[in-house]
Image (tube, coloured by chain):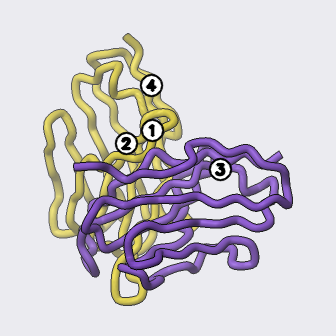
Chain colours: A purple, B yellow
Amino acid sequence: EAGVAQSPRYKIIEKRQSVAFWCNPISGHATLYWYQQILGQGPKLLIQFQNNGVVDDSQLPKDRFSAERLKGVDSTLKIQPAKLEDSAVYLCASSLMQGASSNEQFFGPGTRLTVL
Amino acid sequence: SQQGEEDPQALSIQEGENATMNCSYKTSINNLQWYRQNSGRGLVHLILIRSNEREKHSGRLRVTLDTSKKSSSLLITASRAADTASYFCATDAPTSGTYKYIFGTGTRLKVLA
């Protein structure tokens, strides 16, 4: 079974520029997550989709971050404009079940973003 | 906000020794999960323990859960160099009719050959 795919793996941009990340979850997985992981910290949930609807985006900085999951499959996360503090690894994960508290999440390799 | 706090933040042991790391959390949970993250990679699910379970085993892993103390521990027995990684606990929290997961700060484990 193919895993969660993410691209690009690395991205370097200057502050105030825009950037977009792409994620393709495991086929059939209803739930998709975007996390931000700052160096030395645990992943922080930015947004969670169930199929193509948003179930939680409470920690997404909506003035600069946006995400969509068209057709309930792959997803893009965009930052516009980027700030220095956005430098982090952006992880995408997916899980099979809907509405269950025991969901095992499968993570992609992440995109390492550096904002100069 | 991060609900889980792991300790120690970093741990260095010799190959063959056991490694124990702890996770404390703040609110009631249904499940607690442990994940491993190798340097530069995504996280990998290790084990899930439900709130009505006190102990669970998987290979060289042993997880305990004490809901009265809101804490969990992960024990890796007979450690190997390949166990070098960061380990995170994740607790569930209800959101919009489903659940989200809140990760702790992680323990960085280094196993010396």
Say above or below: B18 vs B1: above
> Element under label 1?
strand
Classify 10 Å Cα crowding around label 3: few (below 14), some (14-19), many (20 and above).
many
In the rendered image, which residue does mark 4 sit on?
Answer: B110
In the rendered image, which residue does mark 2 sit on?
Answer: B36
Query: Which is nearer the eye, B54 or A103?
Result: A103
What's the amino acid at mark 4? Lys
Please name the residue shown 44% across and 31% down the image.
Answer: B109
> Element under label 4?
strand
Say above or below: A79 vs B95: above
Q: CA distance from mark 3 to mark 1?
A: 16 Å
In the rendered image, which residue does mark 1 sit on?
Answer: B86
Q: CA distance from mark 2 to mark 4?
A: 13 Å
Front label number (2 vs 4): 2
What's the amino acid at mark 3? Ala
In the rendered image, which residue does mark 3 sit on?
Answer: A88
Which comes sooner in the sequence, label 2 or label 1?
Answer: 2
Instruction: Give yes or no for contact between labels 2 and 1 (Cβ–Cβ under 8 Å).
Output: yes
What's the amino acid at mark 1? Ser
Q: Chain of mark 2?
A: B
